[in-house]
Amino acid sequence: MKHILTPLILAAAFTALPAIADDAAVLDPTIKAQAEALMEAGLKDDVGLEFTESLTTEIGPRLAGSDAEWRARQWAMIKLKDLNFQQAYIEDFNIPYWERVTETASVTGANPQNLAITALGGSKSTAKGGVEAGVVRFTSLADLKAAPADSLRGKIAFIDERMVRAQDGSGYGHAVGKRSGCAQAAADLGAVACLIRSAGTDSHRMPHTGGMAREGALGALPAAALAAPDADQLARLLERGQVEVKLNIQVKTADSAASGNVIAEVEGSSLKEEIVLIGCHLDSWDLGTGAIDDAAGCGIVVAAANLIQQLPGKPKRTIRVVLYGSEEVGLFGGKAYGEAHADQLDKHVLVAESDFGAGRIWRLTTGFGEGAMAYAKAMQDLVAPLGVVPGDNSSKGDSDVSVLGNAGVPAISADQDGTDYFDLHHTPDDTFDKIDPEAFRQNVAVYAALTYVAAETGWDFRKAAAPATEDQ
């Protein structure tokens, strides 16, 4: 559905600032009015939801480097052209490839029963037919690493560490450590395989997958995540005595597979060489349909840019929408974009990525130069009526765009409510029905307003603080 906005005459981009930016409002009233109109339109938008529904329905799971990810790129090109973006193109790159084939686990012996598991990305295969061994439980990765040398010879290591639920998802950073570290630590002690309690916050028999390494490389051992109830079950069995588990993981790998970034633009006018980049990642894990991670993010940024391109005049700066490939297996799309555009990073004035589901945005964090904090406050004030509170100035951007943020490009993070995000993340339950349309549209409204302001004002988000004088 298209939304026609009331035409507004665009005025001067910004008022003069004092030598040291203060907390005074700096947003031109005409630009502010247009941004508010975009927010209102975003709250009624259906383009983003339709984009997300179509991607998750017509393509489904989009494992990095797979035929499905290739189909997603072709699908995205058609959709973006249908939405009349001035440019839509693909930048190709290659990645190492990993794919699950078989994954089963069962307790053997006196208490035989199946366990719900999923192989971790980068897991090695077991021997054909699987491996059967005794299980040794550890409460953390540090606990495993502290075990005596050679103490796991011929055993299966099991890290039974719970993840803490948090609105900002801060529990994930610690919980994911066992996913990346278990196999190598267990191999160093002579183990034959590694099991972990899923890095997730749900209590369902839905194990959470995820990569073992950010380089897409194979890990040291066969490794899998247990669903939370199955981790509980295994722990209870171990309290009763020794437990033997038969684990069968078979995977397919290749040294090189095709991937790519899909890029579309809303062409700028007087400052069209300068770029405001908003992104998402097009790939997903293969268990669900990748709705919250990250088809929703793609729908949000595409819808936001689409609202802006419907305005009667072009924004000053070019708005670039990047649907990154192969994020899940190692930020390959973000790294490829950074390399391909290394000589243009000074033209990237602001970056942001939506990659934390479809919950309401509750906080706006910036990563601006010290002299640009008045701009941060103006943007935070603009979206405050949508329930967004100010964050700090520590943002480097999320996921793929963090490659640019870490290279010095100013960034914003529109932080979504992730209280329930890790109930669904990387599981078979990551499906379109989990998206709240009202919360999704609030995201579109926030991204449309902030992207427009960044493109239309011409603000220098790298602005350094003015040098102090003797009387300051």
Image (cartoon, rainbow, N blue to C red):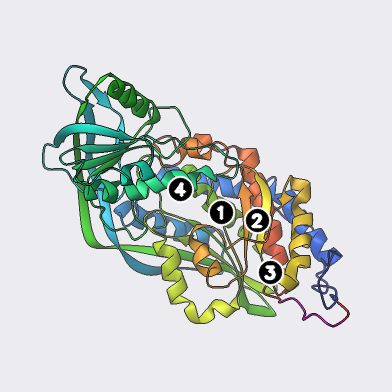
Residue drawn at point x = 52 percent, y = 35 percent? 434
Q: Amino acid at mark 1?
A: Ser
Q: Which class describes the residues within 10 Å of circle 2: few (<14), some (14-19), or many (20+)?
A: many
Q: Residue 156, percent across and down?
A: 22, 37
First in sequence: mark 1 or mark 3?
1
Left or right: 118 as drawn, with respect to 281? left
Label 3 vs label 4, nearer the camera = 3
Q: Are marks 1 and 3 in contact (CB under 8 Å)?
A: no
Q: Is residue 9 above or below residue 162?
A: below
| Residue nearer the viewer, 224 or 318 | 224
Q: Amino acid at mark 3?
A: Ala
Residue 455's disc number: 3
| Residue nearer the viewer, 83 or 90 | 90
Q: Is residue 455 above or below residue 208?
A: below
Q: Are marks 1 and 2 in contact (CB under 8 Å)?
A: yes
Left or right: 150 as drawn, with respect to 356? left
Q: Residue 106, percent across and down?
A: 22, 27
Label 4 vs label 1, nearer the camera = 1
User: Is disc 3 placed on a helix, strand or loop?
Assistant: helix
**Residue that badge 1 annotates:** 354
Q: Amino acid at mark 2?
A: Tyr
- Residue at mark 1 to residue at mark 3: CA–CA distance: 18 Å
**Residue that badge 2 annotates:** 447
The number of numbered badges drawn on the structure is 4
Residue sitting farthest toward the left: 128
Q: Residue 317, percent across and down?
A: 66, 73
State the image quarter where residue 70 is shown: bottom left
Q: Amino acid at mark 4?
A: Leu
State the image quarter where residue 229 is shown: top left
